[in-house]
Amino acid sequence: MPITQFDDPVLRADGQLVVGGPFILSADERARLLGDVVIRFLVIQDSDRNRENGAGNAMAEGTASWKQNEPDRWQHIVPAARAQGFVVGARVRGIGCALLVKEAPAPSPDEPPSFESVTWCVSKHVAQG
């Protein structure tokens, strides 16, 4: 199963939100992978979790992809217009879902490729970038 996670999302001075993290597959999983991995994510800033700094509710979502010939990381830049309301230092929840297409463990004409999904949810803080 892939090892995946979120880094602290980074709020740039121009308002863009950089979201990403590691995506690590074993050698066997890499060998069986067909095409790119699609990663959907949500980053949610909840006012109830941020009473101490007064940050309000905000949500950003996006779709990233990871290719085998890239480093073991994924990243997506959410445009400022879709990342409004995030506050540096605020606690956020990152929720991700990766979709992989893999060959059968022992490829044969009788075993088609299959889909595998991996989900994760973590607490992070918005970093300044």
Image: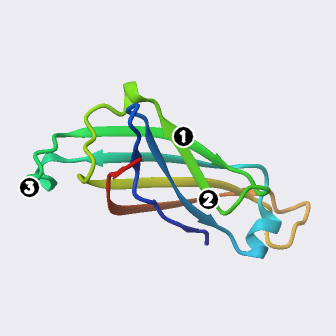
| Label 3 SS | loop
Image quadrant where residue 14 sits: top left
Horizontally, residue 61 falls left or right of residue 77, namely left
- Name the amino acid type tagged 1: Thr
Using a 10 Å C-alpha cutoff, classify the residue at mark 2 as few (fewer than 14 neighbours), some (14 to 19) or many (20 or more). Answer: some
- Name the amino acid type tagged 2: Arg
| Label 2 SS | strand
- Mark 1 vs 2, N-terminal side: 1
Cα distance in 3D space between marks 3 and 1: 31 Å
Cα distance in 3D space between marks 3 and 2: 32 Å
Using a 10 Å C-alpha cutoff, classify the residue at mark 3 as few (fewer than 14 neighbours), some (14 to 19) or many (20 or more). Answer: few
Colour scheme employed for the rendering of this structure: rainbow
Residue 51 percent coordinates (x, y) = 8, 52
Specify the label residue 77 is tagged with. Answer: none
Specify the label residue 73 is tagged with. Answer: 2
Q: Nearer the viewer, residue 53 or 112?
A: 53
Query: What residue is disc 1 on?
Result: 63
Give the foreground label among 3 and 2.
3
- Mark 3 vs 1, N-terminal side: 3
Query: What residue is disc 3 on?
Result: 52
Q: Residue drawn at (41%, 48%), measured in percent from left and top? A: 10
Q: Residue drawn at (30%, 46%), measured in percent from left and top? A: 44
- Name the amino acid type tagged 3: Glu
Residue 115 percent coordinates (x, y) = 66, 56
Give the foreground label among 1 and 2.
2
Q: Residue drawn at (31%, 39%), measured in percent from left and top? A: 59
> Are dots 1 and 2 in contact, CB under 8 Å?
no
Horizontally, residue 118 falls left or right of residue 124, namely right
Q: Nearer the viewer, residue 117 or 58?
A: 58
